[in-house]
Image (cartoon, rainbow, N blue to C red):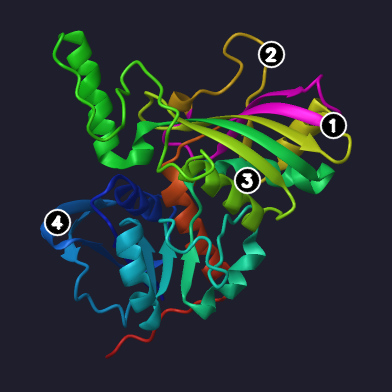
Amino acid sequence: MGFKVAVVGATGNVGREMLNILEERGFPVSEVVALASRRSQGTEVSFGDKTLKVKALEGYDFSDTDIAVMSAGGNVSKEWSPKIGKQGCVVIDNSSAFRYDPDVPLIVPEVNPDAIEGFSKKNIIANPNCSTAQLVVALKPLHEAATIKRIVVATYQSVSGAGKEGMDELFTQTRAVFVADPVEAKKFTKRIAFNVIPHIDVFMEDGSTKEEWKMVAETKKMLDPKIKLTATCVRVPVFIGHSEAVNVEFEKPITADEARDILREAPGCLVIDKREDGGYITPIESAGEDATYISRIREDSTLDNALNMWIVSDNLRKGAALNAVQIAELLIERGLIQPKKKAA
């Protein structure tokens, strides 16, 4: 028997990708329901060769639904996820609303699958931030081998991380530049076309941004609370795919060759690392792919037991939709959820 799955926020970039991935991976569904706000009611979205009409989240009865994958923003999730969970439906939430709640597991299946056992306290499981997800997939096997002390990361994050509005703004501004029209910044704080912006999410008291803080807090929660991490998060004029330049200091010696061999065997990782022109991955090649790609692995000559690397992944997939579906698959694999008995 299959599972009844609701996709909340089905009209957004990530919601549509969730529908694609559920179908691509042959997720055992008995029924898929597309939900969004009232203003999107009646909109059509694709699920494989089927077309689903979007229903309104408000007032929807989740009592016969097994899993709700949420990608409707933090405010919607704060209001609805606890209500949905109380109806006996497991919520897999893509927003930041519950990531730091001690009673809600924050899961990347390749990194901390055992933590999923704690989901029943609130019937909510959190999906990490897109930039954190790819980072911890690449670093988990290296942490197991040589124990990470400190991470310095600079991100190069695509505009799709800011939703459809971010993608539209890059397109509109790029076209405006070429036809000599005025360039307007609406979604971003400064022009994004042919520019980079060292500012993602709101500023915090210490001068870091919330995006940078998320990477610190989430890495500690999923990987190891003892790890020190500092980040600079930058929005770049790329449509899909987040990139990260990462410097990692370890407690134990580890060579670039050893790291490369470990990562080649690690789940979810693909090493593309030839020391020649084009022997590395870029965001455009990661788009539409499930893997976290690692390139430019090399030793840091300024520190003992330290490596530099370049990590790239499709932020709409591993950074969001794919990870959510993998969490749902993990629930089923471990027998933590059974399809509800349907009324005759």
Q: How far is the residue under mark 4 from the one under mark 3?
A: 35 Å
| Residue 117, above or below 182 | below
Magenta segment, which residues? 286-311
Residue 329 shown left or right of residue 270 in the figure: left
Nearest to the observer: residue 151 or residue 222 = 151
Whether residue 138 is visible to the viewer of this picture, yes or no, is: yes
Q: Could you tell which of marks 1 and 3 lies nearer the N-terminus?
A: 3
Mark pair 4, 1: CA separation = 53 Å
Q: Whole-percent x and y of residue 172?
A: 20, 24
Res 335 → quadrant = bottom right
Mark 2–mark 4 Cα distance, whole angstroms, equals 49 Å
- The answer for how far apart the CA atoms under marks 2 and 1 are is 21 Å
Q: Is residue 334 visible?
A: no
Task: Name the amino acid type tagged 2.
Answer: Arg
Mark 2 or 4, closer to the camera:
4
In this rendering, is residue 168 above or below 97?
above
Report the amino acid beneath label 3: Val
Which residue is under mark 1?
A: 305
Specify the label residue 136 is tagged with: 3
